[in-house]
Amino acid sequence: MKALKITLLLVISLMILGFASIFNPDKTISEKVAEKEDLSTLMTALEAAELVEVLKGEGPYTVFAPTNKAFAELPEGKLEDLLKPEHKGELAKILKYHVVAGKIFASDIGEEQMIKTLEGSELRILNQKTTDDYMGDESEAMNSIMVNNAIVTNADIEVSNGVIHIIDGVVMPSNQEVLGAMEQNEEN
């Protein structure tokens, strides 16, 4: 009888520990990005902009993470220019435009909202699922969450210091100051 109680107590303890690990992921944003092969360009950019430690910090943060394919779709030569040491500030601004303070899950996103980024500008988040469900449109773009013009392809990757949403495009601050500053530097 005593052995049964001990075994039962052990099983319950293991179940509690198992559930705790599910709900409390132990990797940070930076660590999760580093382990995902389709986010290797983002990791390279975070390293070049010296933002890896920020995304290892306490947070919480929400990151809209562009895929390698999204970076590849930038105008020819733009990524290479951004990764140069002399453009570290501009790169950091673009990357911070993909980060929001706090945890925002897909279920938290209303029909349309503007969210302030760490860069200081606002992202336009549009939940097409709630906006267009009544129209019966089942296309990917009309049945998804959009961040400016990028589509969230994988939502709610929870990590210890926030949440990651993978997006299919690199979003830029609407004022385009960043790209203008880069072009001016190239002319000098």
Image (spheres, grey):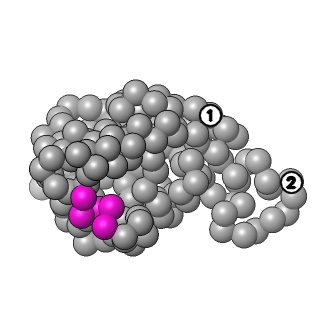
Please identify the quadrant where the C terminus is shown. Answer: top left
Q: Which residues are magenta?
A: 77-81
Residue at 35% over, 31% down: 118
Where does label 1 land, which residue?
A: 113
In this orientation, does residue 180 appear?
A: yes
Residue at 47% over, 60% down: 169
Front residue of this view, candidates 178 and 9: 178
Front residue of this view, candidates 126 and 21: 126
Q: In the rendered structure, find residue 134 and report the number of the disc placed on it.
A: 2
| Furthest residue in direction right, as rendered | 135
Residue 155 higher or lower than 57, as above or below: below
* Number of dots carrying numbers: 2
Q: Are marks 2 and 1 in contact (CB under 8 Å)?
A: no
Judged from the image, the secondary structure of the residue bearing numbered disc 2 is helix
Return the x and y of residue 173 as percentages of the image width and height: 46, 40
Front residue of this view, candidates 154 and 79: 79
